[in-house]
Image (cartoon, coloured by chain):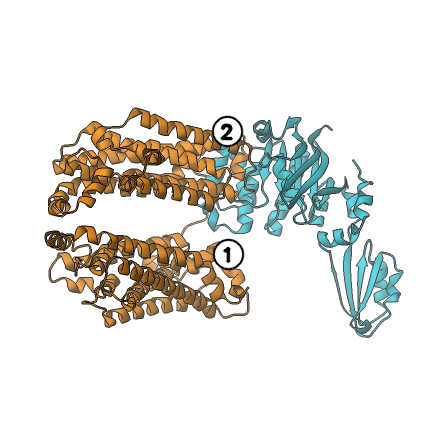
Amino acid sequence: MWWLRSVFLKTLRDYRVAILGWGIGMGLVLVATMASVATLTTTQQAREQLVSLAAQFSWNADAVAVDTVGGYATFKIGIFIFLIALWPLLAGSRMLRGEEDRGSLDVLLSVPRPRVRVALEKLAAIWTALLAMGVLIGLVAFAGGQKFGATFSLGDALLFGLNLALVCALIGGLALLISQFTQEQGPAAGWTGGLLLIFIVLDMVHRVVPNTEWISRLSPIYYYNLSKPLVPSYGVNVGAMLVLLALALILSGASVWLFARRDIGGTVPLPRWLRLPERTASQALPVGDWSLRSVYARSLGMMAVPAMWWTLLISGWAVWVVVVVQQLQAKLSALLASSPAFINVIKNIGGGDATLSTGLLSAMLFFLPLFLMAFVVTQVNGWSADEQDGRLDLVLAAPQPRLQVLLGRFGALATATIVISLITLLATAAAAAYAGLNLDLGNLAAATLGMVPLGLLVAGIGYMAAGWLRTAADTGLLSFLLAAWFFISFIGPELKLPDATLRLSAFYYYGTPLLHGLQLTSVLEVVAVAVIALGIGAARFARKDIAV
Amino acid sequence: MAAIIEVQGLTKSYGRKRGIADVSFSVDEGEVFGFLGPNGAGKTTTIRILMALIRAGSGTARIAGLDCWHQSVEIKKLVGYVPGEPALDPNLTGGQILEFFAHLRGGVDQAYLKQLIERFDLDTSRKFRQYSTGNKRKVVLIQAFMHRPRLLILDEPTSGLDPLNQHEFDRMVKEVRDEGRTVCLSSHILSEVEKTCTRVGIIRAGSIVRIGGVAEVTAIKRYEMTITFGDAIPADAFRTLEGVIETEALDNGHTVRLAMQGPADAVIKAAARYPVVSLTSHEPSLEDIFLRYYEGDAAAKEAEHVVA
């Protein structure tokens, strides 16, 4: 077992799935953007419209040669840097602090090997993983570019991957540094995520407000965007890449330096004015905490914070769509007129017999149930993990039927989905009133509240599968289902898939509620399947061996 | 006394992995019963069947006359449980965890709960994830005792506790026994069971090999003594002494290792005739005892001597 010969190899082995998944996955995201260029540049007029449209969205990224495959992909991927940086952010915050949380670092540091070397080997593994991901992204991008007629070379594609790897190394280094000051891994990841958002906004400033480039220079993302290897006429900025490399080295070096000097399990002491008030030991019991009164209430309490973030995402998306849809339609009109394929996609998702404005709105709101179902997947994952990790043992040792425990958790999830949908409805209605958009309130309610049965369906299937599958397999199955349903409903009509196949997707039963309201039979069908799945899951849970 | 726990022919297998086979024993109301066995012997499997967390392949398990699987909710009203590996919501504080379980049990005597917290000196304001192993154990011990259950089922309850808290735990078990309540605790430490329990069941490789009073089990307790001398000495000088079961000469006769059972007086006196450099004595692990004591067919022979 050669991969167990060193900390470096062992850590790199731990990253093998992430290297392949993230590398190929991000490469495919890039290729997906390349695929749409041809349909957007069929005529000279459409090409000019695309350039004009991109210029209007330049807050997102520099609109350089957006009518070329490489330029368009670079432009589109701009805002996705947040997604791309997610892995190094998590890996950096977990590298040392995560192991300290689990207590495994104590064992690792008990071997006769200097602490700095252990940290450097782990760091080297992250950097190697990022380079491997960069190479994979470059290779997939090159292959995609060849398919869609791009002009960039393999070297350009690999330089694109390298530039990504460098900015990711910097973000990972930042997370690693912050984790030296936090007691747990989560806050380090949260702080880094917050800083990343600030960096992205800072980088945007100079593209929106003239003469503010000096502000954007404070953001590492600015230096990342100075290189556009997929646009051969633009090329790379070696100086900017060196700045990224230097910052990544400084952050990582400082992290290792601090790690070598602090207590394991402790943090680097902050200046007094930055410290939180010291917690004093107490033997008091909480009084009047509603979330401790039952399994249902406790489950609701557990979901509160993630549900809040998902509510912000879902209702935020709905509000944004409602506010910009008219503006977007005006800007897209010429482009859409010359791109029947794009119009078809909108009609297939948004509803075929509607005006473009409402159809576009309907199509964009199509993502709402997808987001809600993704939230449900994360919660089902939590249920399955609680059982697998033994956290249900003591709950089930209390005098209450297993069924009550499962239904308590399910009930809390159902409540959360209803609350998210209601808030989305209220926010969207308010946004429509603000934007002067005349929407049928009944249909808007159908579009938002109609998400709930789909959420319950995913929950039912997830709870059922959790009766047999382990957490990773259950989550994988649900994620696959979501992707398959989305593919069937998004692309299926264009591929002329038979109606029987389209009916396999849950989105089919959601329909186009903004235009046509909810179809009662469809809702009942979804609810019936959800109830059956939950019933099977409950029967299984009532009889199964726990945490085996 | 009537039996509060009755286990008959209990069998559980995990595919190819070993479980338990034909386990039978009973625990009388008011006694402290020790369930002793090395790691992986089947203690936790048996306890999890009693708690209806897993279902037996065959056999019956009853608590207070109720079937452990079909009437588990009624049983859990009577039982306080400590799992072998306490896993709880890592984001709740110790106080929140205790309050949550108090609600799940329909409320507990808050004054008694506070008393337990004070006895274990638990800081209830820390999150479960921030607790040390010992403090995590304190939280689950308090939640098991806080509703004054008729029966306590404790899976390796003192694992990770410091001696002070172990002592406190021993006192609490004695109080429970004095109040006529019952404790069934598992352990792999012979001396711990010896100290706390009135009766002991020994499980090995998924099967009960011996059940009896503590004194009876203590009889199998062996220990090792290693004596290093300034000069080479004849190891045979110890072979026939009282309490010596085996002798082994090491280091060209400078060291002698003795397997002992019973008093060491004769050995000490014999050793005193030579220049002793060091003398160490340690209790062998239970696994060692089993390997030696039950090797071959001895297990089968011992099973015949089970005291009901």
Residue B150 coordinates in the image, percent (x, y): 63, 31
Task: Kindly identify the residue that appears in the image at 16 percent across and 32 percent down.
Answer: A439
Q: Nearer the viewer, residue A238 or B189?
A: A238
Residue A463 coordinates in the image, percent (x, y): 45, 36
Q: Secondary structure at mark 1?
A: loop
| Label 2 environment density (alpha carbons within 10 Å; few <14, some 14–19, many ≥20) | some
Q: Rounded to the nearest whole Å, what is the CA distance between mark 2 and mark 1?
A: 36 Å
**The residue marked by circle 2 belongs to what chain?**
B
Q: Secondary structure at mark 2?
A: loop
Left or right of A214, for residue B160: right
Name the image quarter holding the N terminus of chain A: bottom right
- Callout 1 amino acid: Gly
Residue A450, image quadrant: top left
Name the image quarter holding the C terminus of chain A: top right
**The residue marked by circle 1 belongs to what chain?**
A
Residue A284 in view: no
Residue B220 in view: yes
- Callout 2 amino acid: Gly
Left or right of A379, for residue B133: right
Where does label 2 land, which residue? B106
Where does label 1 land, which residue? A103
Q: Which chain is orange?
A: A
Residue A295 coordinates in the image, percent (x, y): 45, 33
Q: In the figure, B296 relative to A439: above or below?
A: below
In the rendering, what colour is chain B?
A: cyan
